[in-house]
Each structure stands twice: as structure tokens, then as C-alpha cells.
């Protein structure tokens, strides 16, 4: 189980050798200025792709928050008149909520892993550019996400939101069952 909860990312040393086309190393790809321009364009496209993954992650959060709200509200409306319904009927929306919380957790984890890998590739691309604003500057200034007093990566916190929802849903079900 720990294998599925822990995340690791490839290092720059693992990624950089696989990033470059062998012909680029031989100088067959044109002048140094041409190569630099191509690398810059690829860098821009790749950073945009990483940003789009983050945007999709935000949309995923919005989707699951809306779905949680819808199901929890429907269950609350049904449960409002407790005398007409058995408490165990709440197990159906509870199951739906717990399943979607699990899916939400794993999707966020997957987005986190994908973006972590993308930013290592961004760092490798920056090795060939005149400046390294993300890899050598910003990420280092933030303590590489290891020191929460400098920066606590949003993905570390965000991934536990579905877990907290699931705990609240379970607690609510237990309270309703005991009432």
C-alpha cells in the first residue's frame, strides 16, 4: 500500500540524457542560434503543456466538488424526513461519495506525478537556455518544496481534500445511524 501512496520523481540527471536528439549533439541541426531558437520554442510549448495539466487538475477539483455537493445535498433532502426512510438507505449515497472521493484522490495524485515529471523536463530544457528561471531560480528559492516554512506545494495539500471529505461522510453516516 505504501508503494501506491508514496510518489517519486525522476532526477534531472535521469531525464536530460534522454531529452536530446542524438543529431542535435553532433551539430547536425543547424547553427547554434537556430538550435537555441528551436529549444526556446520547444520550451515554451512544454511549459504551456504543464500549465494545461494544472488547469485540468483545477477542473477536476471543480467537478468533484460539484458532484459531492449534489450527492450530499440530495441525501440530506431525502434524510430530512427521517421517519419515512431507513438509515441504511443512506449507504447508497455514502458508497457513491466514498467511491468518488477515492477516484478524486487518485486523479489528483496522477496529476501531481505528471506535473512533477513535466517540471523535471522543463529543468532539463532550461539547461540549454541562457537562463533557468524555474529550475535554478524559483524552485531553489522555494527550497524545492521540502521546507514547508518556505513553500508547501499545493498538490501535497490538495490531494488530502478528498480524504477529509470521505472521513466527514463516514462520520456523518455513523452519527445518522446512531441517532
Image (cartoon, rainbow, N blue to C red):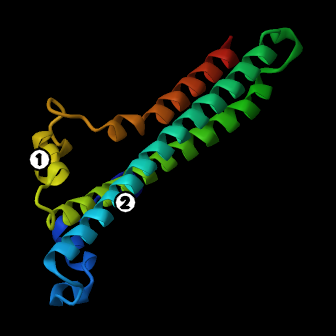
Residue found at x 20% / y 34%: 151
Q: Secondary structure at mark 1?
A: helix
Q: Is residue 14 left or right of residue 178?
A: left
Residue 99, given in percent of the width and then of the height, sits at 63, 42
Judged from this view, the residue extending furthest toward the right is 84
Instruction: Kindly tell me whether residue 106 is visible in this rendering.
Output: yes
Q: Quadrant of the N terminus?
A: bottom left
Is residue 70 shown above or below 178?
below
Q: On the image, which quarter does residue 3 sit in?
A: bottom left
- Tell me which residue sits at (26%, 59%) in the image: 122
> With respect to residue 80, does 177 lie above or below?
below
Element at label 2: helix
Image coordinates for residue 143, horizontal then vertical, percent: 12, 42
Residue 137: image tag: 1
Return the disc, 2 or 1, that comes first in the chain's sequence. 2
Q: Is residue 162 left or right of residue 33?
A: right
From the image, state whether disc 2 or disc 1 is nearer to you.
Answer: 2
Give x and y (percent) for residue 158.
40, 35
In the picture of the structure, the residue carrying the numbered disc 2 is 45
Please say if 130 is above or below 172.
below
Q: Nearer the viewer, residue 117 or 96?
A: 117
Residue occupying image coordinates x 69% and y 37%: 96
Amino acid at each position: 500500500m505504501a508503494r501506491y501512496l508514496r510518489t517519486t520523481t525522476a532526477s534531472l540527471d535521469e531525464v536530460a540524457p534522454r531529452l536530446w536528439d542524438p543529431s542535435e549533439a553532433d551539430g547536425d541541426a543547424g547553427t547554434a542560434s537556430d538550435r537555441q531558437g528551436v529549444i526556446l520554442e520547444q520550451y515554451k510549448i512544454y511549459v504551456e503543456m504543464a500549465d494545461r495539466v494544472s488547469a485540468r487538475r483545477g477542473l477536476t477539483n471543480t467537478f468533484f466538488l460539484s458532484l459531492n455537493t449534489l450527492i450530499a445535498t440530495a441525501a440530506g433532502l431525502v434524510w430530512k424526513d427521517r421517519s419515512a426512510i431507513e438509515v441504511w438507505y443512506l449507504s447508497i449515497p455514502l458508497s457513491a461519495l466514498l467511491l468518488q472521493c477515492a477516484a478524486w484522490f487518485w486523479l489528483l495524485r496522477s496529476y501531481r506525478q505528471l506535473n512533477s515529471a513535466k517540471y523535471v523536463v522543463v529543468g532539463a530544457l532550461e539547461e540549454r537556455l541562457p537562463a533557468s528561471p524555474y529550475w535554478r531560480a524559483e524552485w531553489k528559492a522555494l527550497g524545492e518544496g521540502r521546507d514547508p516554512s518556505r513553500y508547501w506545494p499545493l498538490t501535497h495539500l490538495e490531494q488530502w481534500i478528498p480524504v477529509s471529505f470521505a472521513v466527514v461522510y463516514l462520520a456523518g453516516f455513523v452519527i445518522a445511524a446512531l441517532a
